[in-house]
Amino acid sequence: MGKLKLLLLTSRPVFWSVYFFICLLGIVTSGIWNVNAFLSLFYVTMPLGITIFSINDIADRKSDINNPRKGGWQGNILKKSDIPFLLWSVSIITISFAVTFFLLNNFLAAILILIVPLLAYAYSFKPLRLKGRPFLDSLINAVGMLLVYLLGFSQKGQIDIFKLPLIVWIIFLGFIAAHALSTLADYEVDKNLDYNTTSVFLGRRLTAVYCAAILIILSLVVPFHLIILAYLLICIGFCLTLLGNPGKKFILKGSWFLIFGFCLMSAYLFIFDYQFILKITTN
């Protein structure tokens, strides 16, 4: 596999737009558009994907061989010879972006960049390996999304975590549910490998109920917008269909549909209802 193709597949392009919109929300909240802002938006695409998923794929290199989802755009099955190249890539990306933000006097962004690979390591590798700890696996993914938001917001120079807009915490909880839901796609593989993910711990149906409960709560507290409400109701409906224990392909296709729906919803709000975005980022 060519080096560029290896980096591209490892970075999971399907997730770039998710990170992009979360970071963009942080920038809008800060109200500051400068070089730091545009650099942040660039980082959360391919560079961020390479950083977090390289570490994950290296940790799961042997177990991914038995995962039918891996080996393409949903994740690489790495060769041992790929590992040094990916580790160097992660190091170069992390150091170069951290130094650049430091030189641009955005010290907070530089710190956040350095935290990213540490978070990925804690998720993927022992002794912590939070990927195999129920609820913590979803929590650390939500924390990662919070870091993406804070990277966009870091143009302010200082952050009071307790004064962030309500929408940020709604998204935070939403990603806890989203990750728990995503673990259902690998339920059988994880169970056979004794990976105690949230879905393995709760079981398929209880995981669906857990995710639906979170989404129902979010639908009651999120600032009203017809498109957001419709999206949440679709997500809740998908969770409820999982109570019938559908096949793996249905779960996988449904999960990707929800990711695409999130990006489509975000694009619509930023393009056609920017005033709503401004409203929810100032409350």
Image (cartoon, rainbow, N blue to C red):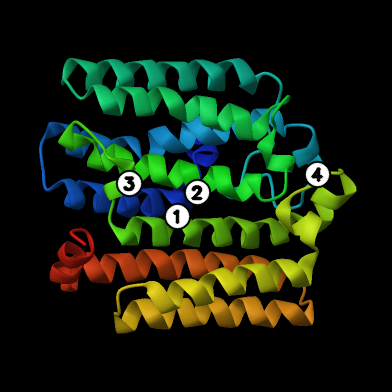
Q: Amino acid at mark 3?
A: Phe
* The C terminus sits in image quarter: bottom left
Q: Is residue 2 visible?
A: no
Residue at figure coordinates x 28%, y 15% from the top left: 99
Mark 3, residue position: 162
Query: Where in the figure is residue 218, as x and y percent of width and height?
Result: 45, 71
In the drawing, what numbered circle is on residue 195?
4
In the drawing, what numbered circle is on residue 172?
1
Between tags 4 and 3, which lies in front? Answer: 3
Between tags 4 and 2, which lies in front? Answer: 2
Query: Where in the figure is residue 226, as x and y percent of width and height?
Result: 31, 84
Measure the alpha-carbon separation of dots 3 and 1.
14 Å
- What SS does tag 4 mark? loop
Looking at the image, is mark 4 or mark 1 earlier in the sequence?
1
Query: Where in the figure is residue 125, as x and y percent of width and height?
Result: 68, 27
Between tags 3 and 1, which lies in front? Answer: 3
Between tags 3 and 2, which lies in front? Answer: 3
Query: Where in the figure is residue 224, as x and y percent of width and height?
Result: 30, 79
